[in-house]
Image (spheres, helix red, strand yellow):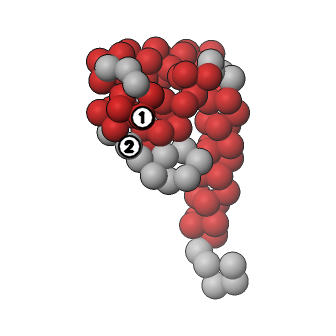
Amino acid sequence: MLGTDAEVVTDLVESNFEQRRLIEKVLRLNKREKNVLQLRFGLFNGIKKTQKEIARKLGISRSYVSRIEKRALTKLTKEFKAEGY
């Protein structure tokens, strides 16, 4: 990374660290919550899906996908707040 601004390098390292922390927390969720977040936000493959697409794939309603997503995000938020973020 010669010739790269030090601030850019710092930002990349920090971003990578934050991504790893998020993934660790996502992996602690129950199977359905983890699956919905992975599909919704493209966490491991970069391909994001709509709630409707996820509902169709999992054979559940879009509103149920929404509830699962909200519950999972609430859990993640609580974990990050507990760490002081």
Lower position in the chain sequence, tag 1 or tag 2: 2
Residue at x-position 62% and y-position 30%:
26
| Residue 2 image-quadrant placement | bottom right
Residue pointed to by mark 1: 57
Rendering coords of residue 15 (x, y %)? 59, 51
Rendering coords of residue 24 (x, y %)? 70, 33
Residue at x-position 55% and y-position 22%:
32
Left or right for 81, reference 65? right
Instruction: Specify whether residue 81 is in view.
Output: no
Rendering coords of residue 38 (x, y %)? 53, 38
| Residue 49 image-quadrant placement | top left
Residue 32 is labelled as none
Residue type highlighted by circle 2: Lys
Under tag 1, what secondary structure?
Answer: helix
Q: In this view, does 29 lie above or below 13?
A: above
The furthest residue to the front: 59
Left or right for 8, reference 63? right
Judge the density around disc 2: few (<14), some (14-19), many (≥20) Cα neighbours within 10 Å: some
Rendering coords of residue 56 (x, y %)? 35, 32
Residue type highlighted by circle 1: Lys
Residue 49 is labelled as 2
Judge the density around disc 1: few (<14), some (14-19), many (≥20) Cα neighbours within 10 Å: few
Instruction: Specify whether residue 13 is in view.
Output: yes
